[in-house]
Image (tube, rainbow, N blue to C red):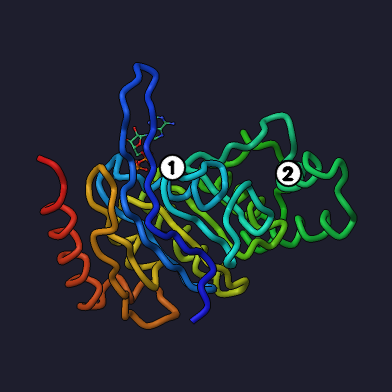
Amino acid sequence: MEHVIDLDAVGQVFTSSDGTRITALQGVDLHLRRNEFVSLIGPSGCGKSTILRLISGLLRPTEGLVRIFDYPVTEPRDEIGMVFQKPTLLPWLSVLDNITFPMRHKYGRVSDAEHQRARELLAMVGLGDFGHKRPHELSGGMQQRVSIARSLLHDPDILLMDEPFSALDALTRDEMSFELLRIWNERPKTVVFVTHSIQEALLLSDRIVVMSARPGKVDDIIDVPLPRPRNMATLADPVFTQMANDIRMQVFSRAPV
Ligand SMILES: Nc1ncnc2c1ncn2[C@@H]1O[C@H](COP(=O)(O)OP(=O)(O)OP(=O)(O)O)[C@@H](O)[C@H]1O
């Protein structure tokens, strides 16, 4: 099985402003396959976002090795798209210009083909008629759709998503999960998805990485055998309910009191 992302014995120690050393990650081994959907869950501060930053090349590990397509990660790369908790759109640009902004920023220009692709992506996330609007004219869910479209403009092989739906209301959140599954189905890629929601992780993932409290380690990697395509009926599947309970017990039993 081909690995797209490899973390070998990765450790991360931060030195805080008062000189205290914080071991955020210790001995993390992770091997993620092409086009699989993997969620990271675990208690607050166990290093989930740190893992995304290491994969993205925004951070270099203090121990061990991070590789993408077998090459050590030394800097941010074009094969990777990122979506954060907040949509981080530029308020003075139109929705379409927000989507093409990273290209314009990096290469100084945006080709006609990229403009066309931006319009297609906007249609794909259900906002075909909103390209000329400004971000403040859109709801939170719509803004997050724009940031997903932006992350897909250069058709990355890897999509890193850091609690992308956590700022949304429960209904929009479910809707966005199904939408993400549809997009992932249309444009398969390796997705690493950080969430605090066990349900969200189960609904979306092929595998769930359960992390233990700081110093963050991989506690368990759980295969999710639920059939695809997943939909509303998946939420009522007895396997879903049982797994959600089991994982909840596992996470709580490891969390610091
Ligand atoms: N730049 C930094 N300097 C110092 N400490 C840091 C830095 N970045 C992260 N940390 C610490 O490393 C630990 C892991 O942080 P990280 O944000 O990866 O956790 P997380 O699991 O994503 O947390 P949450 O679920 O609350 O978002 C935390 O204790 C955090 O305070």
**Coordinates of residue 25 in the picture (x, y in percent):** 33, 46
Query: Crowding near pointer 2: few (<14 within 10 Å), some, many (20+)?
Result: some
Q: In which quarter of the image is the C terminus?
A: top left
Where residue 255 is drawn, which disc sits there? none
Given residues 88 and 237, the one toward you in this image is 88
Total tally of numbered discs in the picture? 2
For badge 2, the amino acid type reads Pro
Q: Is residue 21 left or right of residue 152?
A: left
> From this viewpoint, is residue 165 visible?
no
Q: Is residue 187 left or right of residue 163?
A: right
**Coordinates of residue 251 in the picture (x, y in percent):** 18, 55
> At 46% from the left edge and 68% from the top edge, which residue is drawn?
32
Q: Is residue 228 left or right of residue 218?
A: right
Q: Helix, strand or loop at disc 1? A: loop
Given residues 130 and 143, the one toward you in this image is 143
**Coordinates of residue 85 in the picture (x, y in percent):** 47, 42
The vertical placement of 46 against 173, above or below, is above
Sequence-first disc among 2 and 1: 1
> At 43% from the left edge and 49% from the top edge, which residue is drawn?
51
Which image quarter: residue 245? Answer: bottom left
Q: Distance between the residues labelled 2 and 1?
A: 29 Å
Q: Nearer the viewer, mark 2 or mark 1?
A: 1
Residue at the disc numbered 1: 62
Whether ligand 1 has any atom under 8 Å from the Cβ at mark 1 is answered as no
Q: Ligand 1 is found in which quarter of the picture?
A: top left
Q: Helix, strand or loop at disc 2? A: helix
Residue at the disc numbered 2: 102
For badge 1, the amino acid type reads Thr
